[in-house]
Image (tube, rainbow, N blue to C red):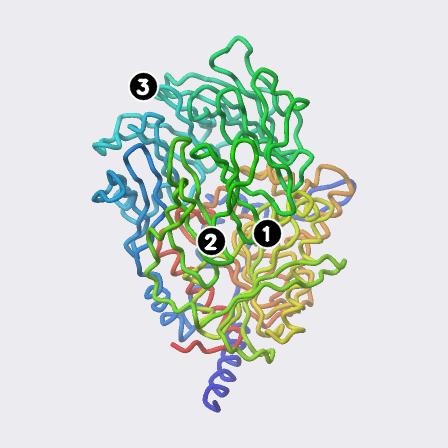
């Protein structure tokens, strides 16, 4: 014990000395300023918004040299990386997707850069490789993002992206032979694909410049006929008056109905119109003509349309209507809103499979097409499921179940007998009996009751000395449910606590919970997070000196806002790919669509002042002792552009250098994007750096 205390003491002092000796780059400061409703706001690092300029590239080079020099000085960094590799190195499967007599699934042998798509004939057939994205690049940065099979189960359209970009290319192959066809679609973004007859619908932008600078405006819907060049694709829909709208067209399984979905930047919900291909003279029949609510067609059965919506039901419901008159006045509540949130609905084997969220964990029920509840799918424990998709004629579906201490397992569900059987179990080397998870409820600043999951080793002493990793999101109706993470095992096996609160802004309790954390109510999200941190310290799970706060994207904004509002809240802050400049976020890539949650600085004086009050970039103050901070981003993130993190890091280093003895660093990944499609090696390296930075600055020595 004495040796451990001495080692920790020395480590704390070494870390402090290293931080004090850090020489941050001194980037040029411009004189750019914007005026908002009579208030001028300086933006001296505006030039960093040009990620391809020589000046920005040189700054990135200097910052990475500093950050990686610091990380390499951490004595146990390589040991943590090695341990993560050991834990990660086991076969990982996705649940199968049934396509006629074929079963498609993804598999990663362990440390492959990208997962491989396999196909087998019949449930007991021999798998063969269908698409191996690892052969598409030398460094594993080309990812397979999605697949969709033709309605005759013969062809497969698939999406690939490079270096984590949101821009995608679409290709087509023959499932039986694996032969790749000549079809190639470019400039596809924020769009899937939907097969119809001998081709498919997709949405794209017109090319302007390169992929990183091309405008995300005037998205159009095209129809691609198999065997023809993209140049001959038929334009099916465009909107010349609303440049920021996203639109997508799809067909029902039997191809009788076409659906047109439209989303508007800054608006919640969607518009929906239906076309009956048996009666095309009726044209597009509007089902939802105003924004503000979600309306999604589940499937059709003859003249009946089954729709999931939150109109008049903030926790969602399923309605049924008839194509002869599908206007909302004829809608009939088939599965009325219940106590808990209806998350997804699918129609398989003449039954509706409904996944509900109860206090942020999943429950699954079956209903007949008259709305009568038939049965509940018995899940192994409290946790999360993904799956239950299928075609109307299928007699089986697959789903993956996991929880914090239950590694992902794939189940086959028999629709006739209402029974689940294990299809594949995870082979991760993990003893779930050594750990425990629980859900508690705490009160936020305004008295709101907020749930939080807490996971740790059994028998861990709650004396306030445990390291704790507090992670949250809080936005865009996204729900955080109990799920397994191999990366998280590094924390748990070293006596750290993992805590995950379900903040307002998420979708855990429906539309009202979501909207309570948006626009002029966004501070509720930060207050919920702060209250979670204070609860963990008050209840002796940890202390502020042993607490790390973490989040990505909107969660990165969360961490940035909280560390600037309450710099004493934690020892370590880990904002990842965060939205840090709330005054200008809507001017880049797809940012305008986030206005539905945030509002914009141009909306009104009140909205500008509210955003300016919490925007992380605008609220870095001199004389403040900020926590040890490692910002993470990617040099070509084309969703949350890296300029957010660049400007935040430069300002934090400039202003905080004289008052904070903690390191204030930025780690900039190259040839990577917002996070999806990242090769395994990069995932492991980033996690090793993050946990090493956290433990090092807490004065904790991992057991390795």
Q: Position of residue 100 (x, y in %)?
A: 31, 32
The residue identified by callout 1 is: 358
Q: Is residue 50 left or right of residue 97?
A: right
Which residue is depicted at the point 49% across and 29% down?
A: 299
Q: Is residue 30 visible?
A: no
Instruction: Single out the residue that lies furthest toward the bottom.
Output: 2
- Which of discs 3 and 2 lies nearer the camera? The answer is 2
Measure how far apart labels 3 and 1 are at the Cα level: 48 Å
The residue identified by callout 2 is: 379
Q: Position of residue 554 (x, y in %)?
A: 58, 50
- Which of discs 3 and 1 lies nearer the camera? The answer is 1
The residue identified by callout 3 is: 228
Q: Is residue 361 visible?
A: yes
Measure how far apart labels 2 and 1 are at the Cα level: 13 Å
Q: Residues within 10 Å of mark 2 (few under 14, many from 20)?
A: some
The secondary structure type at the circle numbered 2 is loop
Whichever of labels 2 and 1 marks the residue nearer the N terminus, that label is 1
Q: Residues within 10 Å of mark 3 (few under 14, many from 20)?
A: few
């Amino acid at each position: 014990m004495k040796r451990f205390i001495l080692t920790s003491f020395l480590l704390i002092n070494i870390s402090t000395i290293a931080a004090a000796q850090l020489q941050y780059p001194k980037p040029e400061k411009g004189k750019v300023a914007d005026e908002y409703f009579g208030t001028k706001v300086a933006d001296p690092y505006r030039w960093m918004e040009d990620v391809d300029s020589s000046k920005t590239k040189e700054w990135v080079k200097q910052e990475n040299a500093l950050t990686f020099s610091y990380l390499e000085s951490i004595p146990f960094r390589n040991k943590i990386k090695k341990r993560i590799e050991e834990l990660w190195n086991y076969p990982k499967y996705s649940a199968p997707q049934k396509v006629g007599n074929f079963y498609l699934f993804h598999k990663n042998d362990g440390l492959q850069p990208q997962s491989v798509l396999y196909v087998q004939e019949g449930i007991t057939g021999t798998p063969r490789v269908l698409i191996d994205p690892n052969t598409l690049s030398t460094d594993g940065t080309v990812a397979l993002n999605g697949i969709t099979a033709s309605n005759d189960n013969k062809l497969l359209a698939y999406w690939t992206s490079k270096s984590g970009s949101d821009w995608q290319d679409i290709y087509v192959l023959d499932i039986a032979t694996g032969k790749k066809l000549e079809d190639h679609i470019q400039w596809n973004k924020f769009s899937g694909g939907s097969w119809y007859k001998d081709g498919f619908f997709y949405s794209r932008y017109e090319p302007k410049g390169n992929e990183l600078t091309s405008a995300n405006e005037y998205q159009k819907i095209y129809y691609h006929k198999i065997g023809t060049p993209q140049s001959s694709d038929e334009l099916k829909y465009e909107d010349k008056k609303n440049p920021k709208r996203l639109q997508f067209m799809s067909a029902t399984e039997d191809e009788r109905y076409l659906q047109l979905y439209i989303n508007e930047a800054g608006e919640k919900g969607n518009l929906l119109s239906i076309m009956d291909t048996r009666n095309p003279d009726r044209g597009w029949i509007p089902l939802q003509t105003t924004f503000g609510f979600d309306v999604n067609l589940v499937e059709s059965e003859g003249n009946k349309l089954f729709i999931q919506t939150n109109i008049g039901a903030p926790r969602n419901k399923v309605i049924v209507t008839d194509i002869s008159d599908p206007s909302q006045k004829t809608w009939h509540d088939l599965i009325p809103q219940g106590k808990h949130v209806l998350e997804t609905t699918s129609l398989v084997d003449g039954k509706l499979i409904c996944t509900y969220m109860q206090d942020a964990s999943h429950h699954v029920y079956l209903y007949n097409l008259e709305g009568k509840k038939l049965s509940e799918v018995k899940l192994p424990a409290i946790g999360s499921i993904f799956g239950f998709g299928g075609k109307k004629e299928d007699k089986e579906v697959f789903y993956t179940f996991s929880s914090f201490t239950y590694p992902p397992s794939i189940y086959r569900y028999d629709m006739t007998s209402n029974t689940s059987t294990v299809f594949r179990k995870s082979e991760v080397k993990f003893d779930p009996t050594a750990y425990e998870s629980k859900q508690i409820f705490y009160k936020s600043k305004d008295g709101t009751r907020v749930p939080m999951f807490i996971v740790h080793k059994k028998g861990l002493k709650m004396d306030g000395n445990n390291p704790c990793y507090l992670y949250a999101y809080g936005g865009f109706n996204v729900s955080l449910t109990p799920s397994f993470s191999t990366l998280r095992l590094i924390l748990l096996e070293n006596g750290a606590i993992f805590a995950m609160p379900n903040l307002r802004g998420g979708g855990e309790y429906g539309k009202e919970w979501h909207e309570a954390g948006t626009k002029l109510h966004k501070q509720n999200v930060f207050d919920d997070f702060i209250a979670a941190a204070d609860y963990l310290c008050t209840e002796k799970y940890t202390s502020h000196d042993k607490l790390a706060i973490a989040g990505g994207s909107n969660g990165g904004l969360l961490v940035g806002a909280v560390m600037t509002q309450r710099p004493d809240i934690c020892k370590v802050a880990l904002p990842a790919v965060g939205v840090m400049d709330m005054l200008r976020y809507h001017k880049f890539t797809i940012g305008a669509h986030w206005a539905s949650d945030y509002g914009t600085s141009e909306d009104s004086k009140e909205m500008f002042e509210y955003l300016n009050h919490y925007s992380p970039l605008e609220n870095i103050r001199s004389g403040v002792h900020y926590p040890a901070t490692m910002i993470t981003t990617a040099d070509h993130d084309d969703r949350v552009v890296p300029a957010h993190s660049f400007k935040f890091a430069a300002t934090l280093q400039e202003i905080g250098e004289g008052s904070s003895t903690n390191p204030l660093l930025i780690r900039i990944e190259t040839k990577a994007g917002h996070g999806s499609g990242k090769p395994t090696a990069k995932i492991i390296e980033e996690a090793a750096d993050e946990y090493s930075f956290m433990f090092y600055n807490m004065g904790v020595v991992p057991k390795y």
